[in-house]
Amino acid sequence: MQTIGERLEEARKRKGISIREAAENTKIRGDYLQKFEANTFEIDLPALYIRGFLRSYSRYLDLDPVRIVNDFNILLADGKPVRRETREVYGRVDFAEAARSKDAGEPAPANRAAQDQALVLKYGLLGGGAIVLVVIIILLFKVIFSGSTPKAAQVTPPPVQQNTVVQAEAAQTLTLTATDATRVKVVQDLDGAVLFNASLARGESKSFKKQGKLLITIESGKSLRMEVNGRNYPVPFDGYGRFALD
């Protein structure tokens, strides 16, 4: 029976895609994809993140994500993930050029080091851009909600202003509706209380009383619709991610 890694590697090679191309298209780090294909899952990430990456990678390779994730859960329960060596490197090495360099008494070009440096730079820029995007989204939410507050509330005494804010927040209701099966975690930033942490089936909805900022983690952003008091708010990403809702 094939392991998870063997199925992933076979599907990727069948599509004629390199690790680098897969990493660029799925936005998953290339070293993670290499470890997945080597059937090695001992990386410094929560199991929830690994399931999300496996689900996204399986869909990209036209494999059944449910089966892949179930097999991963079985490995996780056993506590002994299978490892196997992989001979594929990230990128390509010109062996003919290396042989010519060796015959000529010259060292082979440091292709791997240059590729690794380019990869680090690229993902560093992508990560910085993602942080900037999240900050812009948070600022937009703050502008929207602060713009709806009457100016008179700013000159009222502090106790009255606090009561007004609490009443306004208590009246807000957050509704999450799954357009496709996905997993959602909702944490109240005020006291760290976990309001919801489970999977939503397609068409299933959950509502929460919103008090202050919420931290929302979604396995598949495109599979979730979000409403506050009946007003639609778009999820700021399509795949796996986390954002704050003020």
Image: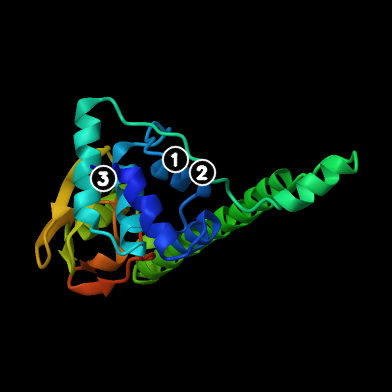
Under mark 1, the amino acid is Lys
Mark pair 2, 1: CA separation: 6 Å
Residue 90 placement (x, y as % from top left) = 58, 48
Q: SS class of the residue under badge 3?
A: strand
How many C-alpha atoms fall within 10 Å of the one at disc 1: few (<14), some, or many (≥20)? some
Left or right of 114: which side holds 197?
left
Label whose residue precedes the other's in the sequence (1 or 3): 1
Residue 180 in view = yes
Under mark 3, the amino acid is Gln
Mark pair 1, 3: CA separation: 34 Å
The correct choice, above or below, for 210 with respect to 50 in the image is: below
Choose between 165 and 13: the one closer to the eye.
13
Mark pair 2, 3: CA separation: 33 Å
Tag 1 near tag 3, CB within 8 Å: no
Q: Which quadrant, please, contains the N terminus? A: top left
Identify residue for label 1. 35
Q: Which quadrant, please, contains the C terminus? A: bottom left
On residue 9, the disc is: none
What residue appears at the point 17 percent right and 73 percent down from the top-left corner? 230
What residue appears at the point 35 percent right and 70 percent down from the top-left corner? 150
The correct choice, above or below, for 76 with respect to 19 in the image is: above
Q: Write down the quadrant of residue 153 in the picture.
A: bottom left
Identify residue for label 2. 31
Identify residue for label 3. 188
Residue 98 placement (x, y as % from top left) = 77, 46
Tag 2 near tag 1, CB within 8 Å: yes
